[in-house]
């Protein structure tokens, strides 16, 4: 099965400084200075403006201190997000050509409100770690939340827990994120995504379909 690229943590500056170009098949691509393609991205930031329009359109202007970008949806998925909310967005880069203008924006797959400002720091650390290929393990935000032991002390522990859980739940068609989250109610959902992303990057997980995960090795 074809493996899908995981979400890549980026600063908005990385999106804005990338080159918009077309490949040999005339498909739009967003290429960074190091030659990599930005497609499925992961950002955190503050909603500084919110727009509405016809056909359930909602647009959010997101800023993270390095720049600003637009997130657009037509399915109601970001309707509940308000101006000045702090958000975490996992989504896909979209490039639209209108006359002589090329518009780069993000369509969201997952949008979460951020309640802990430490998550901004964590995201920045993971972005640097990802870019520089640093092998230093970063601890999860907390091993104990509201007095409840999460059962994991690091992302490495969580990755091992996820591999075991997916193996138990997979009946041959993969396991949805919802099924995973239900089984890990005391662990922050964003941390679960972070661990899954690392498992996708290492080739230990693959996605038969978007948002459905299987172990690559039994």
Image (spheres, grey):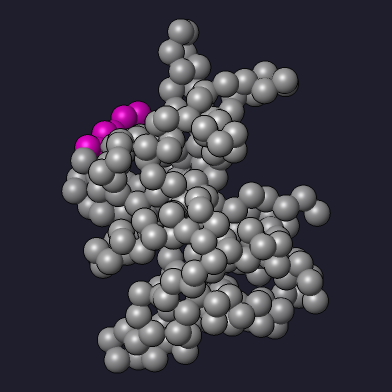
| Residue 3 among magenta residues | no
**Segment tinted magenta in the rendering:** 49-58
Where in the figure is residue 159, as x and y percent of width and height?
Answer: 58, 75
Q: For the point 24% across and 63% down, which residue is it?
A: 117
Q: Is residue 50 visible?
A: yes
Query: Quarter holding the N terminus?
Result: bottom right
Q: Specify whether 143 is left or right of 211.
A: left
Which quadrant would residue 139 be assigned to in this image?
Answer: bottom left
What residue is shown at x 67% (from left), y 62% (from top)?
Answer: 202
Q: Quadrant of the C terminus?
A: bottom right
Residue drawn at the location 60% of the way across and 58% of the way down: 211
Residue 185 visible from this viewpoint:
no
* Viewer-side residue, 138 vs 71: 138
Foreground pick, 57 / 148: 148
Asked if residue 93 lies left or right of residue 64, the reply is right
Measured as percent of width and height from the top left, residue 155 is found at 50, 75
Name which residue lies at 71% across and 79% down: 167
**Residue 106: image location, x then y, percent:** 44, 38
Taking 50 as reference, is 209 left or right?
Answer: right
Q: Depth check: 53 or 142 in front? A: 142
Q: Is residue 57 magenta?
A: yes
> Which residue, as the protein is rendered here, is positioned at the far top?
100
Provide residue 185's location: percent of width, then percent of height.
Answer: 44, 81
Asked where in the image residue 212 lies, by quadrant, the reply is: bottom right
In the displayed structure, 167 sits above or below 94; it is below
Give the answer, above or below, for where 178 lies relative to 4.
below
- In the picture, residue 150 is in which quadrant? bottom left
């Amino acid at each position: 099965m074809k493996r899908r690229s995981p979400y890549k943590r980026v600063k908005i500056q990385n999106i804005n400084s990338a080159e918009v170009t077309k490949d040999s098949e005339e498909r739009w691509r967003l290429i960074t200075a190091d030659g990599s393609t930005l497609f499925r991205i992961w950002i955190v930031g503050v909603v500084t403006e919110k727009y509405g329009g016809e056909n359930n359109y909602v647009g959010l202007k997101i800023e993270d201190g390095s720049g600003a970008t637009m997130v657009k949806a037509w399915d109601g998925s970001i309707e509940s997000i308000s101006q000045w909310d702090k958000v975490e967005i996992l989504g896909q880069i979209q490039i639209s050509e209108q006359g002589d203008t090329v518009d780069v924006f993000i369509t969201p797959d997952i949008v979460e409100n951020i309640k802990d400002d430490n998550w901004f720091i964590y995201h920045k650390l993971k972005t640097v770690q990802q870019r520089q290929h640093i092998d230093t393990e970063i601890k999860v935000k907390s091993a104990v939340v509201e007095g409840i032991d999460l059962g994991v002390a690091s992302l490495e522990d969580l990755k091992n827990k996820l591999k075991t859980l997916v193996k138990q739940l997979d009946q041959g068609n993969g396991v949805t994120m919802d099924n995973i989250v239900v089984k890990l109610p005391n662990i922050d959902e964003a941390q679960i995504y972070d661990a899954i992303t690392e498992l996708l990057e290492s080739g230990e997980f693959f996605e038969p379909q978007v948002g459905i995960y299987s172990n690559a090795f039994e």
